[in-house]
Image (cartoon, grey):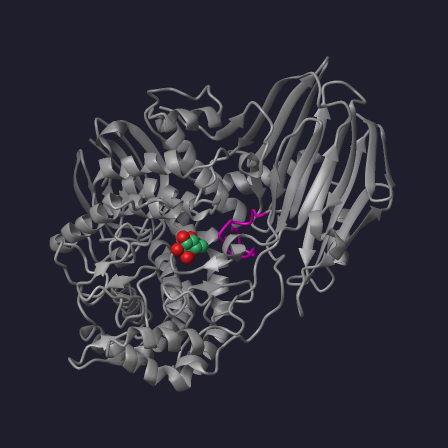
Amino acid sequence: MEQTHRLWYSQPAVEWNEALPVGNGRLGAMIFGGTGSERLQLNEDSVWYGGPRDRNNRDALPHLPQLREMIMQGRLREAEELASLALPGLPESQRHYLPLGDLLLTFNGHDQHCSDYVRELDLQQGLCRIRYRIGEVSYTREIFSSYPDQAVVIRLTADKKQAISLKARFDRESWRYLEKTEKWEQNGLVMTGECGGKDGSTFFAALKASSEGGSCRTVGEHLLVEGADSLTLLLAAGTTFRYKDPEQYCKQHLNGLIGISYAELLERHVSDYGRLYGRVSLALPAEPDKSQLPTDARLELVRQGEEDHGLVALYFHYGRYLLLSCSRPGSLPANLQGIWNDSFLPPWGSKYTININIQMNYWPAELCNLGECHEPLFELIERMREPGRVTAKVMYDCRGFTAHHNTDIWADTAPQDTYLPASFWPMGAAWLCLHLWEHYRYGQDRAFLAQAYGTMKEAAEFLLDYLIEDQEGRLLTCPSVSPENRYILPNGETGVLCAGATMDFQIIEELFAACIQSADILGRDQEFGAELSAALQRLPKPKIGKHGQIQEWMEDYEEAEPGHRHISHLFALYPGDAFTTKPSPELAAASRVTLERRLSSGGGHTGWSRAWIINFWARLQDGDKAYENVMALLDHSTLPNLFDNHPPFQIDGNFGGTAGIAEMLLQSHTGVIRLLPALPQKWGVGEVRGLRARGGFTVSFKWSEAKVTEAVVECTAAGPCRIEAPGLAPIAFMAEEGKRYIFSR
Ligand code: FUC
C-alpha cells in the first residue's frame, strides 16, 4: 500500500500555481525554487486593506415591511429594485486581503549547467526542499514556517565550503511606493508600509541572516552574503492588527531567534508540526504504483484517465498539511486562499465567504483530528457577535446576531455586494455557529460548550425574531435566497428573492436542535429550549418535487440553472445530518435525484462544488460515485501544486476534498460509528489511522476485500459507543475515558 507524503517536481515553478506553499497559520510563503533566483511570495494573515467600518444600511429597516409584502405577493421586480436600494452595505464591499510582498534571492551563475534538480514539499516534516548540482557542488535549500518560533526559516547549504553567495532584497511590485525597504545593520533588511485606507493597519517585515563562514553586509536595500559555508535567513512580519509596534516586535523577535542554531529551529518546528500531522495516516492500494513519478506527471496521467490511488492519498494528506499551515491557534481563519495570495485585488477579496466556502475549509478539521485548527474560526465568530448584533438591530430590528454571505478581518456582518442571488441572505452566522456544536460533538468538551452556547443562542435568537408567519401559520425567512440560484415561475419569469429557501430551514433546524441539546447537557435555559421547540414545529418540512428531487424553494419551481454549483438544499445531507439514509430513505432518494440532476446539467464545475458532491455521495453511501467525483476533482479542478482550482485557485476544494475522502471511510453523524460507509470497489484494501468520530473517539482500522480486519478505538470521553463495519459483528459498549479497545475478525 502506498503512503505518500511528498509532492515533488523536477523543475522550478514557472508560475504561482506551480509554487509550493509553507505556512504556520499566520506567516506564509509560496516558494518557486529557481536556481539562479528564488522568489518567496510572502503573506501575513492580517495584511488587509482598510480598517473597521459600520456599513449597515439604516434604510433597510423602514423598508423591510414593504419588501416582505412585495415578496409574499410575488411582486418580484419591485422587491428586487427595493432590496437593491435599501439593503446593501454602505459601501457595497467589505475589506480585502493583500500580499505582504516578496523576498527575492539571487544566486549569481546558478541558472546555468544545473543538474539533479529536485523541488519537494515534505508533508511529514512540513518543509520545502530544493536540491540541485552545479559542477562539483550540490546545493540544498530548506524552507519552513515555524509555528513555535513564528518565523519563516530559510537554510542554504552546500557540500563544499564557501559555496554560498547571494543577494537578497524585499520587493512589493507596483505597490512598493507605499512603503520603505532598507538595510538593517550589517546582516538584515526591513520593509514597512501602510496596508492602505483610513484606519488601515501598518505592516512591517524583517529579515536577518546568520552565516557559517563568509561575510554578510548590506548595501542600499540589499543584503549581500559572500563565500559562506552555510546560511540561515529568518523572516518575521506583523501588522498593527496584532502588535502596537510591529517594527519593535519583528526586530526583537529576530534578535532573540538569531542565536538559535538551525538544527534547533528545525527540531522545534518538526516536533510541533509533526505531532499534529502524524496523528492521521492513510494507505490506499499501491496498484498502480506511480510513487516514482513527479507529482505534476501523476496529475497529468490522471487527466489522461489513469488511476492513481496513491495520488488520492497524497491529496488527502496535503489537505491536512494545508489546514495546519493556514489555520493555527492565534492565527486568523483560513480565507478563500488559506493565507496564500499574490494579488492586490484578489478574487472575491480573498476574504471569508460564509455561504459555503469558509465552512468547507473547516470540514476536515474535526474528522481529521485537527480540532485545534478550528479555533481561529471560533475566534472570528466571537468577534462577529458585536457587529452582528448591530446588523440584526439596525437592519431587521431583531435580537441576537446575524451575518450575511461574507465577512472580513474586522468581522463585518453587513451585506456584501448588491448581487441578488447571494447578498441578502442573513444565515451566515447561524451556519457558522454549527461549527461550534460540531467541535463539541467530536471533543465532548463541556467547558467549551458552556462558552459556545451563548453564541449559538444569540444566532438562534436572531432567527426567532427574523422568521415571519405566513397565512398558514408557518414560520418563514424573508427576504432570503437559495445561495446563489434563481427560480423560474410558471409564467416563465425569473425570481431570486424568496420567502423560505429550503436551505434556511435546514440550517435553522440544526441550529435550534443544537441549542436545545446544549441547554440540556448544560442543564440551563429550559424556557428558551421550549421556545425553540415550538418554533421548530412551525417550520416548513422538506418537500419532494415533481422530478422526485428535494425542492430548493417552498414552491416546486424549476431552477434557472439546474447545474448550479451551489447545492444548498442538500445542506441536510451534508454538512447537516437530517437526510441520512436509514431514518429518512425518501429524503435520501430525493437527494440522489437532486444530485443526479445537478450533475447531468453540468454541475460540479468549480472545485468546491465538486468537493461538496464527494461528501454528498459519501453520505448517500455510494462509494463508486464518490470515487468518480474524487477523480473529477483531481482531473478538472486541481492545479500543478495540487491547489484547488475554482478556477482560479480557491482553497475550499482542497479541504472539502480531504473531508470527502475521510467521509468515505468513516461516518459518525447518526450516533453510530460506521466504518467504510462509502468504500469504492477500487479501494478493496487499505488502512487509516487516527480519524475522529463524534462522541470523543479516535479510530484506526485496516481493511481487505472491502471488509474491516481490525479496528482500534481510543476513547477520549466516556460514553456509549456503537460501531458498524463490514466484516465485524455490530459492536455496542460503554466506553471508558482513556481506554483503548481492539476489535478484529
Ligand atoms: C461564492 C461562490 C463562488 C465563489 C465565491 C468565493 O459566491 O458562488 O463560486 O466560490 O463564493
The reply, left or right, for residue 109 in relation to residue 582 is right
Residue 648 position (above or below residue 417): above
Report if residue 331 lies within the magenta region: yes
Q: Residue at x 33, y 57 (%)?
A: 441
* Quarter containing the N terminus: top left
Quarter of the rendering containing residue 13: top right
Residue that sits furthest to the bottom in the current view: 62
How many numbered discs, if any?
0
- Compare residues 314 and 41 and report the one nearer the observer: 41
Q: Which residues are magenta?
A: 327-341
Residue at x-position 61% and y-position 21%? 117
Q: Is residue 145 visible?
A: yes
In this rendering, the answer to whether 231 lies above or below 455 is above
Identity of the residue drawn at 36% across and 68% down: 427
Compare residues 463 and 371 and report the one nearer the observer.
463
Q: Position of residue 165 (x, y in %)?
A: 79, 28
Report the magenta stretch's main SS.
Answer: loop
Q: Quadrant of the C terminus?
A: top left
Q: Is residue 585 magenta?
A: no
* Towards the viewer: 218 or 492: 492
Instruction: Classify 430 as above or below 184.
Output: below
Using residue 276 as the reference point, say whether residue 215 is left or right of it.
right
Q: Residue at x 42, y 26 (%)?
A: 300
- On the image, the x and y values in percent for residue 299 come to 42, 28
- Image x and y of residue 170, in percent: 74, 44
Ligand 1 in which quarter: bottom left
Q: Is residue 258 visible?
A: no
